[in-house]
Each structure stands twice: as structure tokens, then as C-alpha cells.
Image (cartoon, rainbow, N blue to C red):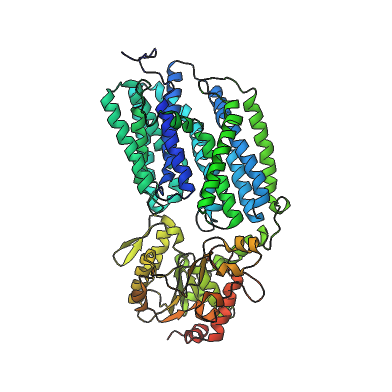
Amino acid sequence: MQRPLTPTGLKPIGLLSDIDGLRAMAVIAVVLFHLRITGLEGGYVGVDIFFVISGFLISGLLHTRIENQTFSFSDFYANRVRRLIPAVLATVIATTAASVVLLQPHMLKDFALSALASIFSGANIVFFLESGYWDSDSDLKPLLHMWSLGVEEQFYLFWPALLLVLAQLGKRHYLTGLTALFLASLAACVIYTPSDDAAAFYLLPFRVWQFCLGAMAVEVWRRYSLPLFSQQVLRATGLALCGIAIISFSAETQFPGWSALIPSLGAALVLVAADAREPSPWLSNPVARWFGKISYSLYLVHWPPIALYRAQTLHELDTMAQIGIGLLTLAMAVLLHYGVETRFYRRGHRATGWRGVPQIALVVSVAGGALLFSMYNNPGNYAAKKVVLTADAIEQYKTDRFRLVRRSCRIDKLDNPKLCPGILSSPILFIGNSHEPDAYNALWGAMGGESYSTFINFGSINGCGSLEIAGDWVRSQRKQCQQRLDALYQNIEAVHWRFVVYSALQHLSESRAPLIHMLNTIMTKNPNAELIVFNDYISTNIDCANIINQLGSSVPCGEEPYVEYFGGEPDGSEVFSEELAAITDYTVDKVALLCGSTSIGSCPTETSDGHPMFVDEHHLTWEFAQYLGEKIAAANPPWLPIMRSGDTH
């Protein structure tokens, strides 16, 4: 028995029940991953599976309508609004109401921006821009999961026009065009992941290949009827690939890159094997189909309760919280699906025009956007919580940390005598990761604010991506970082460095191998230079500002369960202890200088006049760095008078 063919001789896309099962697999993987269920550390790949499914369904729908000359841009976008926006608005409205009550003002400010972006399809861009240096704990962002909706909605903006152009070029060029775009986007994803994984993760150009993969899969599905055995083999292989990724991937997996191919190819194989006549018992059983049907609502509601719980309690999810939030999520998903999603959109029903739901959705979006914009600019007027540190105060602490390094001499500006007068006498090189400014600020304080013109900073390796050891140096795939690396290498011997100051979080850990390698080369080529190493202090597992505002004091920032690492108690990660010790001349032991003993309980978490040691998880505030500088000056180590005098030996 042959399947019915469309007028073009291709199979029509009907309601393939296996797709619901694949959706169920994807959304359950994501939800359980976010609930921190052991053994599912790779559950985040559920989003990648969703991207392939979207490419399959939307491309099949569009191509069929283009071929049948029934496609309308206006109707397509109106239907996308009907399908997606009502549930998004309901989620954002409910989450905003909860956030006003539960979030601190500075967190509400960030939330308002993410909510605004979620409504207008830009959440992925906002979270990309927030990723990196000052990115707050992602576990506390109630709408973080909306990044994937941003990617998908941006995909819808250009995809119909692209398919229309490709279809007009003919069937052969249609597939050729899809394949070319697939390869180009995949190549960009693979190339960028090692150097800029945030861009590769969040931004559409690096994700288009997954939608293309779905589009290519639907063309195979439409053109060929596979024997039952082939379907079963492809389906089993595809499910195995998805399962392997869900179970074996983790936060340590370099992602997306090549790794994303595993679940994406798996999803594509399952889709190619989909058959309405011979559905999979694993994917088309009533339970799987039901979860697949509510998958969109389940995805939308699952993350806000997790983030808000952690923001309120400052604790990880325990077993009871996992169960409670899991049940709450399921109840909210049912409410959203049947109360909102299906009320405004029904599968198989093709509405036309912008009247009704699309118009209302756009009006609500604009009104909600105006409210959220006001909340972003004045979070204190909306937040119910009264706090010690306001949003403005926290932002000021973050800004002040760079008051010196922003106008200081950087290694790639040495040829500018106005910026870098210190190059002529006793230059001092600062190098490290994001803690480089900590040492800079502390030594400026130790020297009483004098002679910092001799300070020359590398500029932190944090903007360098993954550094690769090459010979006696390192290289970066990021152009600006490589320029600084080249400038430093060229001036290792050309400049008579007096001191080299190394400051990095967990400065002896395995991840610091490139920095240790650079220091070895610098000190080998500069036998007269002396190396000063800043040891670690305290790191927390949640922003100290959040702890202060929730508990009313900075003291808990130095207590369990909030301490992630303490410099006075090595945890075994210090793999470069001997290698660094061999080239180190002096050590700035923060614990010895600041604390009464090696016990963390004796360590101050704020200055004598009440400024916190940090407002994020470990970067010293300007005030606390000055406090450390005063302690260094009081100790008067042998290198400090030399540094003050500008002695060149």
C-alpha cells in the first residue's frame, strides 16, 4: 500500500505521532537536567533536539505551501504569533509578578531586561551580552531558558524568504542551498566554540545548521518511503545518539561544536524514520504523546520556579525541593497548555490574518514592554524586598574596580609614551585572569597611590578564549588577545622588567597551565626580573551581594554553605605548586595578611568601614583591594621599598 502523494509527487506532512514522543524526550531531558537529577548531566541537549524538530516541521510546511502556491508571509507570521506569543506572555507576566516579590532590586533590574528581550525575541542576545566577566549566577535568572525561544523566533524571521528563493531555483538547487548553509553554519559553530563558546551557544548564525539539518531531514522524508526495517534501524540509532548525549555529556563537554552533532543527528534520524502507519511504541504511546503535546508549555514554565527558589533560599535543590518543584512545574504546564496555549492555537487549524489573537498579543507585548522598561530603569520602585545594597550601589562597586586599569598602560600600547611613561624606568608587569586588577589596585594602595605610572597590565586572559600552548608561548584564536600576546612576547627581553605580578583565581589549578607556561618563559628570558604571586582569598558559590541582601550581613560570605574555595585550605587542585614555586621570588599571602589565622572564620569579609570584600563571587572591590594594600604596606615586604623607589637593581 502506497502513501498518498501531494500534487508534486511528495508525501504530505501529517500528524506524525513519533514527533510528539521525540519532543517529550527532549523536554523531559531539559527539565530533569535543570532539576539536577544525577545521571542526566547532558540533558541540556534537549534544546538541540527541539531545534532540529522545528527545522523539520517548519521547513516541510513552508516548502509544501510554496510549491502549492498557497504561502503567505503575513499568514505565516500571524500564525507564529498565535502559536508562540500568548504562552510566552503568560509566562513572562506570571514570572514578573513572582520576581517583584522574591528578587532583590539589582536582580530585578537584570530580570526586567531579560523579560523585555523575551517578549521581543531577543533573549539569546541579552544573555550572550551578559555572559562572561560580570555574568551573575545563571541559576538565578528566571527567564534564562528563553534564550532558545529567541533563537527560534529569529530563525522564523528569515527562513521563509530563504526557502522561497531556494524553491524558485529548482529542486536540485534547493537541497544544494540547504546543504551549503548547513555546512557553513556548522563550520562556524565548530570554529568558534573553542574561542567563543558563548557566541556559538547563544547566537543564531552558529545554530542555523541544526534547523537546516531538520529541513534536509524533511526533504529526505518527503521524497523516500523507507522499508520498515530501515525505519527501525534509523529510529533506534537516532534514539541511541540522543540518549548517549543526554547521559554522557556534562558541563565539561566542549559545547556546542562537534559535540552538538550527536544529538542533532540523532533527532534527524528519528524524524526521517517517522511513519504514521508504523509509529514507534517508545515514541507514540499515550504517555509520550501527551508529554509531547504539552512540551512547549512544560518548557516555558519549568525554569522560573527553579531560579526563584534558589534566589530566595540561596541553596541548591535538595530532594524535597526537586520533587516539589517538579510537581509544581507539571501542574503549571497543564494550566498553561490547556488554559492558554490550546485556547489560542490548535494543531491542524490554519487561521489567516492578524485580527484577534495576533493584534491582542502585540498590544499586550508593547504595554508589557513599557512596564518592563520602567522596571529596568527603576528596579527599587518595584522590588518588594528591602536590601542593604541597592542595584546602583552594586553597579558602582563593579565599575569602581576598573577606575585605574581603564586609564593605565597596557602591553600593546607601549609605543605611546604618554600612556606608558613607566616603560623607561622600573616597569612592573601585571598578568593574570580577571583577578589581574585585584593585584593592580592592591599594589597601588600599598604604594600610597604613587608611581603607578610604572604599572603595565597585560589586560587579563579572560577575553582570550581557550589559550593553546605553542612552543615557549601561547596563542589565542581571538584577534585582540593575540595582539596583546604578540606585544608581550616581543617585549619580554626588549623591556627590562623589574617585577612581574601574577594574580589569578585558583592560580595553581590545572586550568592555569597557559599562564604558568607564559610566566616560565617571561622569567627565563628576564633573569633579573622578580616574580610576585598573589595567593587566593575567598570565593563563594553565589554572588556575595545576594548573600548580603538576603541575610543582612557580609559575614555569611565567609561561611558554609556559601564558600566555594578558601586560599587558606588547599583542596588538591593546586597542581602547579612546585613549578610556580621554582620561579617565584615573593608571595602576597592574602590569608596571612588579612586573617588572624588560617581559619576562614578569622578572615574579614568587609573593610573596617563596611565595604564588602566583593559583590560577585570573588573579584575584590576597589575598597577592599585598598584595605589589602594597607595591610601590605604595614607588613613592608622587602620588594615594596624597591618598587616605591623605582630602583632598577
| Residue 120 spot, x, y in % from top left | 59, 38
Q: Residue at x 40, y 53 (%)?
A: 195
* Quadrant in the picture for residue 243: top left
Q: 356 and 513: which one is in front?
A: 356
Most foreground residue, 377 or 447: 377
- Quick check: 104 left or right of 480? right
- Foreground residue among 292 and 286: 286
**As drawn, 113 above or below 626:** above
Q: Is residue 177 visible?
A: no
Quadrant containing the C terminus in the rendered view: bottom left
Q: Is residue 449 above or below residue 130?
A: below
| Residue 604 locus on image (x, y percent) | 58, 75
Taking depth in this image into account, of 523 and 416 the one nearest to the observer is 523
Residue at the far right in the pictured view: 381
Q: Quadrant of the N terminus?
A: top left
In the rendering, at what x and y percent does residue 529 appear?
39, 80
Q: In this rendering, does residue 611 appear at all?
A: yes
Q: Is residue 419 above or below residue 167?
A: below
- Image position of 239 with respect to 272: above or below: below
Give x and y (percent) for residue 499. Answer: 44, 78
